[in-house]
Image (tube, helix red, strand yellow):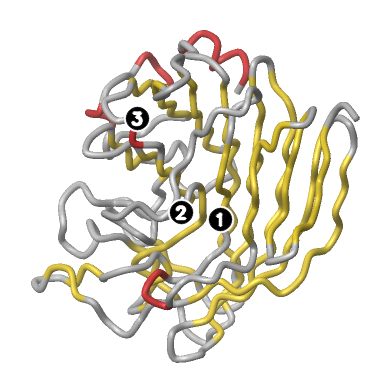
Amino acid sequence: MTGFALTERHGGWLSVDYDGVELCRYVYEPHNAQLESPHPYFHPMRTLDGTLVSLYRPHDHVWHKGLSLALPNVDDANFWGGPTFVRDKGYQQLPNNGTQQHREFGAMRCTADSVEFDESLVWITEQGEEWFDEQREITISLVEDGWRLTFGTALHNLRETTVRFGSPTTEGRPMAGYGGLFWRGPRSFNKGQILASGGQAGPELMGERAQWLAYVGKHDGVGGAATVVFVDNSSNPRYPTQWFVRDDPYACISPAPFFDEVLELPPGQALRLRYDVLIGSTAWDAEKIEKLK
């Protein structure tokens, strides 16, 4: 069989293959400790030729899981995992690690050219309170020398009060504005190349704004390189977004709309986010990224 294949596997995950290569798994029912704020994730993620471009549960941050949506500072709840940064106190391990719980899949479509699925989730605090109803839409398709994952979400506030989305930086830790769609790269990607729209480049992009941001990393064992690109959508709040990005001590990317400014979501309203993530099988330059994004 040629083209895409979508298979639901026993154990709570979907497998997306293209021409016999598993491009990614979407684990929608993780079996992680509460400390890790259990939430769905994509891992492994691979290039078209099968080379790994994601990292799962690294020993330094066991709550990092491939590519996932995770939020560290949501009022007094933590939907990221691990300790919470508290103003004037630093990181504290609190009883506040929430869960993103899968409810059901809606439409699921697979053709030779693409895979699409819709998912309903509920976000539950460690104390068992339902804070958000989420509707998630995923599309996977091909691009030249790679593939594209389109991630769309709508988080509906179920509470009777306004919810504040922030980050460790909004709580007082400089340059730690992570929170949102987050990718952790393989160890071999450390000290890779960071590119962004407008001719920007380098780790100095931490906290800066750009329409897209890319990371070029090298593979151990097989040699060669791959490129991971995040593209912000003009409909997202605070477009173009600020970025949380590192090339040392590990490779990561996160568009960070709450980097240094809290966003408030009134009762009954929805926070809507949409991103394209491109996985390139080689080292892409800015000119190629501009063409494909």
Q: Secondary structure at mark 2?
A: loop
Mark 3 surroundings: few (<14), some (14-19) or many (≥20) residues within 10 A = some
Calculate the distance from the C-alpha at mark 1 to the C-alpha at mark 3. Answer: 21 Å
Depicted 288 relative to depicted 273: above or below: above
Left or right: 2, with 267 as reference point: right
From the top left corner, tell me how far across and down residue 151 is, in percent. 63, 46
Depicted 275 relative to depicted 215: above or below: below
Tag 2–tag 1 contact (CB < 8 Å) = yes
Say which residue label 2 marks: 65
Calculate the distance from the C-alpha at mark 2 to the C-alpha at mark 1. Answer: 6 Å
- Tell me which corner region of the image, top left, top right, bottom left or bottom right, holds residue 225: top left
Q: Residue at x 54, y 46 (%)?
A: 236
Tag 3–tag 2 contact (CB < 8 Å) = no
Label of residue 188 in the image: 3
Left or right: 11, with 116 as reference point: left
Query: What amino acid is at disc 2?
Result: Lys
Q: Residue at x 52, y 15 (%)?
A: 282
From the top left corner, tell me how far across and down residue 168 is, in percent. 24, 60
Depicted 188 relative to depicted 222: above or below: below
- Tell me which corner region of the image, top left, top right, bottom left or bottom right, holds residue 136: bottom right
Left or right: 108, with 77 as reference point: right
Say which residue label 1 marks: 41
Q: Residue at x 47, y 19 (%)?
A: 222
Tag 1–tag 3 contact (CB < 8 Å) = no
- In this rendered view, identify the residue nearer to me: 57 or 146: 57
Between disc 1 and disc 3, whose residue precedes?
1
Depicted 230 relative to depicted 153: above or below: above
Query: What amino acid is at disc 1?
Result: Tyr
From the top left corner, tell me how far across and down residue 284 is, in percent. 49, 13
- Determine the residue located farthest toward the left in the rendered image: 88
